[in-house]
Image (cartoon, helix red, strand yellow):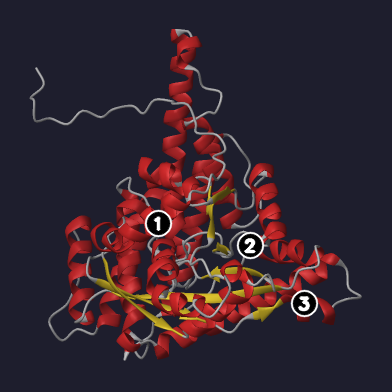
Amino acid sequence: MRKKSEEVWCIPRATKGRGFIAPQFSEKARKFVTFIGGWYLRIFEGVSRIEMEHEQVLIDELESFFRKNQRLIIAFRHVAKEDAPVLMYTLNRKINRKIKERNKQNVQTEHIIPHAQFLYGSDVLEWAGKAAAWIFPKIGCIPVQNRGRNKNGLNLVRREMQTGNFPIALAPEGQVTYHMYHCSPLSPGIASLAVWGAEHGQDVTILPVSIGYQYAHDQEFFIRSVLSKWELKTGKVLAKDETTPIHSLLIQATEITIELLEKIYGNDDSSKDGASLYERMQHICIKALEKAERIAQIIGEGSIINRLYTLRYLGVEAIHPDQHQLSKLSQVEKSIADLKALEAHAFLCHTQVVDVLEYINPEYISPSCSIGRYCEYALNLLDVINRLQGGNIDTRYSPHRKKACVHIGYPIRVSSILSSHAASQRKVRLKAINHSVFEALQRESEELEKSCKFYK
């Protein structure tokens, strides 16, 4: 007979999907989010303070938008799951006093409303919870599928670029990249968004924003504590004493993490012929995706990130099919749907490992790098173990009382880019916009590393 304290493994069942959740903006909801924003950040996201650099630039661009002089796209680096709430609070509360002062100088119709419509991945609600599913549409957030087909979302975004009710805020990297100081390749969507606005005779500005975090006052002690958590979870002990350099500890932990992963996914020739740690990790990513794709019964194509997105959408579709009507299914049909959901959970576990592992590169850290890089590298190694245990980004360890820095960059005038490529094909113009945004975000990430107050 089973003991009461014994845990029972439960097979996940298929449940009806949410379908497309159209935004239904409510001013009351916006004010509610504004009111609770600070509490939410402190209690649920663990952010105790936000520092801003060049906030006047943001206010100026918002004012120009609400004067109908331009369309505004706020393009922010996506380095942690806290980014969107941090940026939303920055818009709604952090600069609120200065916006009120500016509004006193303007007529009512040109008043700045400190808000933006955020674009978010349609799969985000699978881990963000019921509260997010309730509040996102009420503050005008629009679900989109990165590198996927999503006509409803795209049509809405295009219409918003034409009507200009609020600025659009999005993360052009497409997903969390876990690197505060290095920008990953961008999705093509931001360039299309800018061109849609320009096609309707509007000046379009893209405002690059980088975001970073300080996780503790004594950051070296913090890193060692994160590695202690890593040791506890893995059962491995690093060769160290109080004087062992942080860089040496992180490389040790990287090597052991790779060895653990190679036991699961095989090492083939990945660790032979002098392959670097990064090359071995990339090999593991490919092997993990191949295993996930075999379970999903598909042939993977394209880059690692493209294959990840394909598997994610298949997983959500299998676990939460939009047409799932439990009351109309026979017992066998219910069981078949549940088996498909179970298979989806299995292949999604492999994608969760790849989701963070693909961004870990030992070259990102060096004995002379900033301690902020060491912090996020240690957190990423711990997160790999979290994913191996069935976790996801929502269960990633992120300490409370951390501080955020929002670094506002120089505005990118899209009309200037388009005029310099006026005779070029649309694809060339889109590529030029994308390149300009990438360079701006990379530049702001580098500025963030050396300029934010709490990094000094």
Distance from disc 2 to disc 1, alpha carbons, whole Å, reads: 32 Å
* Image vertical order of residue 336 relative to residue 369, above or below: above
Instruction: Please state, as top left, top right, bottom left or bottom right, where the N terminus lies in the image.
Output: top left
Point out the frontmost of discs 2 and 1.
1
Residue 236 in the image: state x and y as whole percent. Answer: 20, 61
Q: Determine the image quadrant of residue 425.
A: bottom right
Q: At label 1, which amino acid type do we have?
A: Lys
Is 301 in front, or is 76?
76
Q: Is residue 255 visible?
A: no
Comes first in the chain, label 3 or label 1: 1
For numbered disc 2, what is the local secondary structure? Answer: loop
Is 410 in front, or is 253?
410
Q: At label 2, which amino acid type do we have?
A: Ser
Q: Is residue 160 visible?
A: yes
Residue occupying image coordinates x 17% and y 78%: 221
In the rendering, which numbered label is found on residue 31? 1
Residue 28 in the image: state x and y as whole percent. Answer: 42, 50
Instruction: Please state, as top left, top right, bottom left or bottom right, where the C terminus lies in the image.
Output: bottom left
Residue 216 in the image: state x and y as whole percent. Answer: 22, 76
In the rendering, which numbered label is found on residue 23? none
The residue pinned by badge 2 equals: 187
For numbered disc 3, what is the local secondary structure? Answer: helix
Residue occupying image coordinates x 23% and y 59%: 43
The residue pinned by badge 3 equals: 415
